[in-house]
Amino acid sequence: MAEKMRYDVPPTQTEPDANEALGTLIENLHKHGFLRLANDLVCANTQIAKVLVDGLSQPGSQTTVQNISLLLMALSRVPPERFNQLLMALTDGANALSEASQDKPQGKAPGIRGAIKILQDDKLWEAISPLLAGMKSFSAGMAQEADKPITRYSGKKTQEEN
């Protein structure tokens, strides 16, 4: 007697396979002009490179690139948790300044007694102390002679310094 044949019905395809998805992607890129743009970029690569090199050889562009690299090097020295803390504090401070300037009308000057009370306010001095320390550090940094950035970050002398 013959054995019973076993046949599993393949599941119905509900999503497109890779070839269909690729075809759809290419069709959409063509429809929206991205293929033409990519094709033109590939054909004009020498002209584009010339424009980029000419643009980057300008003194303003070079200064911009150097400033961006300095900013990135300085940011790399700040741990993410401290940077997050700094951003949140700046946001809170900006919000408090905005609310204070909108909510309250400008009052009169505190006078001598009011100034004396302000000078004896411990919470105010606790809040101002980090700001004063930061201003001292900033002032000391600005009073120093400016090094070349490469010297500051790598310790190497530039050609002009040798």
Image (tube, rainbow, N blue to C red):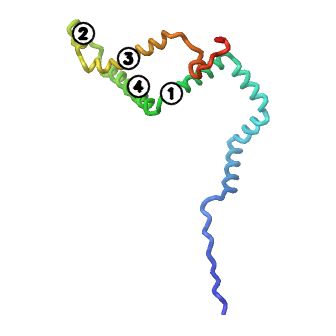
Which kind of residue does numbered mark 4 sit on? Leu
Q: Secondary structure at mark 3?
A: helix
The label shown at residue 51 is: none
Q: CA distance from mark 3 to mark 1?
A: 20 Å
Q: Is residue 6 left or right of residue 49?
A: left
Q: Nearer the viewer, mark 4 or mark 1?
A: 1
Residue under circle 3? 133
Q: Are marks 3 and 1 in contact (CB under 8 Å)?
A: no
Which kind of residue does numbered mark 3 sit on? Ala
Point out residue 102 in the picture as x, y percentages from the top left corner.
Answer: 34, 21
Q: Earlier in the sequence, mark 2 or mark 4?
A: 4
Point out residue 57 in the picture as x, y percentages from the top left corner.
Answer: 71, 19
Which kind of residue does numbered mark 2 sit on? Ala
- Residue ID at (77%, 32%): 45
The mark tally for this picture is 4
Which kind of residue does numbered mark 1 sit on? Arg
Q: Are marks 3 and 4 in contact (CB under 8 Å)?
A: no
Work out whether 24 lies above or below 1. Answer: above
Q: Earlier in the sequence, mark 3 or mark 4?
A: 4
Residue under circle 1? 77
Point out residue 151 in the picture as x, y percentages from the top left corner.
Answer: 59, 18
- Residue ID at (22%, 6%): 112
Residue under circle 2? 115
Q: CA distance from mark 2 to mark 1?
A: 40 Å
Question: For this rendering, which residue is in front, 41 or 86?
Answer: 86
Q: Earlier in the sequence, mark 4 or mark 1?
A: 1
Q: Secondary structure at mark 2?
A: helix
